[in-house]
Image (cartoon, rainbow, N blue to C red):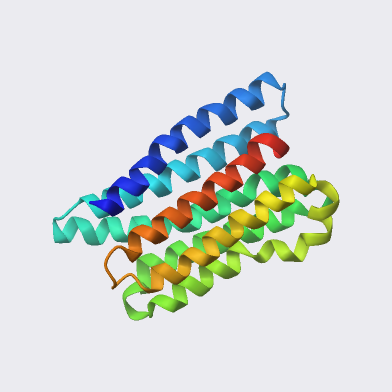
Amino acid sequence: MANSITHGIGVLLGIAGLVLLIVKAALGGAAPAHMASAIVFGVSIILEYLASTLYHAIQVPAAKRIFRTIDHSCIYLLIAGSYTPFLLITLEPYGGIVMFVVIWALAFAGISFEIVGRQRQPRWVTIIIYLVMGWLVVFRLPQLVAALDPLALALLVVGGLCYTIGTIFYLMKSIRYMHSVWHLWVLAGSIFIFMVVILFVI
């Protein structure tokens, strides 16, 4: 129940966030890339938290297995969706489009892995893939530092650390409530990234 509640809150926050992102982009007379980034980012948040909420709420074994795959696949969408505003807007002059293609290619490769080979791989393999994707931005760190406000950078780092620290609790999920703690770290990471996107990017 706690797992469903934590990410159920994420669904509600994600819906509100998507509305705010679209309104911000529209009122600012944003270019198409801004609106597209706002929608992709907002939708990716909603999809991940919705998939997670349903997976943890459903108790029918067959359905639960399906939603488990959907839940873990949506994590790749969340990572790629979170990158999208930075790659299409902030880093666009620095080869952001190329990295955008790479990140989304990795996301779809990860989803394929979830569908085809998940049951044959240990949990830590998936965690490594998530972390590698999440921190690929370090290859554009100088450009990101030059393009973003220092406060935005600080919030971005905190968000990334929330996701990273959270994986520790994910690996400990056999211990009671550790999975819910991981959910809270992920939710915190999403909130920090959202703050950067809506305040400094869109």
Q: Left or right: where does residue 148 sit relative to residue 27?
A: right
Nearer to us in this view, 148 or 77: 148
Q: Position of residue 174 (x, y in %)?
A: 28, 73
Examine the rendered structure and indicate whether residue 60 appears above or below residue 178.
Answer: above
- One can see residue 72 in this view: no
Q: Position of residue 89 (x, y in %)?
A: 74, 42
Q: Position of residue 114 (x, y in %)?
A: 39, 66
The quarter of the displayed image where residue 73 is located? bottom left
Q: Left or right: where does residue 82 sit relative to residue 168?
A: right
Q: Residue at x 27, y 52 (%)?
A: 2
- One can see residue 81 in this view: yes
Q: Residue at x 73, y 57 (%)?
A: 98
What quarter of the picture does the C terminus occupy? top right
Nearer to us in this view, 86 or 190: 190
Q: Residue at x 41, y 45 (%)?
A: 47
Q: Residue at x 83, y 55 (%)?
A: 143
Q: Position of residue 94 (x, y in %)?
A: 83, 53
Residue occupying the far left of the picture: 60
Q: Left or right: where does residue 161 sit relative to residue 90?
A: left
Residue occupying the far top of the picture: 27
Count the marks.
Answer: 0
Q: Left or right: where does residue 202 sit relative to residue 120?
A: right
Examine the rendered structure and indicate whether residue 62 appears above or below residue 24.
Answer: below
